[in-house]
Amino acid sequence: MAGKARYPAKARSVAQAVALSLALAACSTTQESNFAGPDYSDDTRKLEKQMMAEATALGTAQGVAGAAASMIPMGAGSLVTTTAGRAARDAMMIRHDKLMREQIERDNAAFYKRYGITDADAGPAVADQSAGGPKRCARRGGVRRC
């Protein structure tokens, strides 16, 4: 009988963890846009808001999965959820980076057109100057060496 009473308590604690994760996601504060001002379009701000919502949803899903996996006595579930969560996060970051670079390129093109700047006058695009741009450097010991 003692074994049967143990499972409802675990189910209750999992339900409490799920409810807490959902409550935290709902209460997460919204930050001001990093793309404020006339240099960026409303589409860029909308894309940023969408990406933030996706990141919050993924974080909530990871929290719920982690709470459920922690209830497995052997702990093997945590290994699976951690690996899967990291793969999902990495894939999301790559996709978001690509989408935002494309949107910034569209904003730059609109800016150049508005002020009559040609491609020759513009120089390298802003999106190509980031650390993950076309220039690749070797990584040794977690430090980028160029």
Image (spheres, helix red, strand yellow):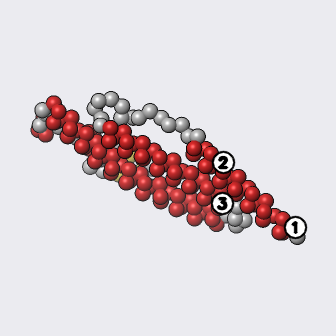
**Residue 20: assigned label:** 2
* Residue 144: percent from left, percent from top: 38, 46
From the image, tell me which residue sits under label 3.
68
Say left or right for 62 vs 46.
Answer: right
Among numbered discs 2 and 3, the one appearing first in the sequence: 2
Among numbered discs 2 and 1, the one appearing first in the sequence: 1
* Residue 86: percent from left, percent from top: 50, 57
Q: Secondary structure at mark 3?
A: helix
- At label 2, which amino acid type do we have? Leu
In 3D space, how far apart are the residues under numbered discs 2 and 3 (Cα atoms)?
13 Å
Among numbered discs 1 and 3, the one appearing first in the sequence: 1
The reply to whether the C-beta atoms of the residues labelled 2 and 3 are less than 8 Å apart is no
Residue 79, quarter of picture: bottom right
Say left or right for 26 vs 129.
Answer: right
Q: Measured along the vertical axis of the image, is residue 131 above or below residue 73?
A: above
Please tell me how crowded label 3 is: few (under 14), some (14-19), or many (20+) other residues with Cα within 10 Å: many
Q: Quadrant of the C terminus?
A: top left
- At label 3, which amino acid type do we have? Ala
Please tell me how crowded label 2 is: few (under 14), some (14-19), or many (20+) other residues with Cα within 10 Å: some
- At label 1, which amino acid type do we have? Ala
Q: Nearer the viewer, residue 29 or 98?
A: 29
User: Looking at the image, can residue 11 be seen?
Assistant: yes
Q: Measured along the vertical axis of the image, is residue 121 above or below residue 22?
A: above
**Residue 2: assigned label:** 1
